[in-house]
Image (cartoon, rainbow, N blue to C red):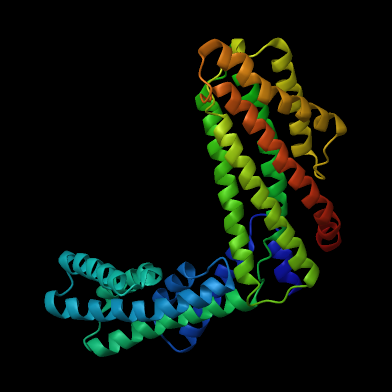
Amino acid sequence: MVMLHTLKNFKILGSRTLKTGISVFLTALICGFFNLPIIFAVITAIVTIEHTAADSIKKAAVRFPASAIGALLATAFYGLFGKGALTFALVAMATIAVCHKLKLDDGILVATITATAMIPDFQDHYFVSFFTRLGTTSIGIIISTFVNFFLLPPNYSPTIYKNINGLYNQAGLLLRRIIESVTAESKEKSRGIQRSYRQLTAHLEKTNQLSRYQREEWKYHRHTDEEMVSFQLSQRKLAAFQQIAYHLGNLQYVQTKASDFTESEKELLLELTDEYVNVLLDPAHSISERQFNMVHQLDEAFWKWKEEHVVKQTGYRHHLPPQTILIYEMLCFHDVLEELQNLSEKQMHVVKRCYF
């Protein structure tokens, strides 16, 4: 086991790569011992290693019947059309269609590979070929499932915490770019900001996916109460970031010009943005008293702005121009940061005790 953990820590070999190699080795060893065709079992072992033990168990229950269907269809079409290009095409299409119809989608890849790989090496006795191929495929599924369950269970929590900190850093830099753009005479190209926002949301989705993996993994492996509390707090922090991403998405589409604000208003927005960025970049997400004072000023500006800039100039009392949208989003942003500060105070000591 010491050797396994040493290899896992080697950057080139991740735990999933290492488990794939072990699965292939054990599968080939067993098939060789019983003098069974190795290639089918090895291919199956390679494609059935999953991110979590939970996925391995669930998908193994789907892949076995799917493989049986693929092997049966390969036997039937080989008997009808022989070993030709048409047979390969029909077997592949029929396997995919039948598995999809029976809602065995997680087993389509293994079933199709099993079915098409059988065709070149059919023996004279079709039933012997059928059970041989099905048996070797089953060995690959079983071995990879056991290896995934018992060896090197993944722990995604440290990566999740690291990703969350990275998300907040990205959000801080993006917020500064957006506010500098909407309050400046020469604007940054919106495509660049939108590209950065898409990268941010993709990173967020990846972190959410890792969180789902971790929840599934803990259904089958032990974890401490502190690990669970820490993970739950990180999920609340991730939920808070979802709100931040929402407000950033709104801010990037606000259409304003530098002339829409007075110099004091622009200065207030830029200085407040700097405060927000500091909170986002700070691991503890502490809010300064200066920020609270500036938010109070912006709140007052929000209620006065409509009267001074809209009603007097246009006569419309219910019109919501981009300037008020910008101020409103900035105020909402502060509310999320307050929630974030409260969460961080609870989280930091738990995370440090568990992982650092």
Residue closer to the observer: 169 or 36: 169
Q: Residue at x 70, y 16 (%)?
A: 265
Which residue is at a point 74% across and 13% down the rendered structure image? 264
Residue 135's spot in the image, x, y percent?
39, 85
Q: Is residue 183 visible?
A: no
Residue at image point 72% right, 77% down: 222
Seen at 58% across and 12% down, the residue is: 312
Is residue 134 left or right of 190 when viewed as pictured? left
**Residue 104, quarter of the rendered image:** bottom left
Image location (x, y in percent) of residue 6: 74, 65
Number of on-image labels:
0
Q: Is residue 138 left or right of residue 234?
A: left
- 212 above or below 307? below
- The quarter holding residue 147 reads bottom right
Closest to the observer, 48 or 101: 101
Q: Give the vertical position of 135 relative to 114 (above or below).
A: below
Q: Which quadrant does the N terminus fall into?
A: bottom right
Residue 324: x and y, percent? 60, 25
Residue 152 sits above or below residue 9 on the image:
below
- Which residue in the rendered view is the most extreme toward the left? 80
Query: Is residue 236 something one can see in this rendering?
Result: yes
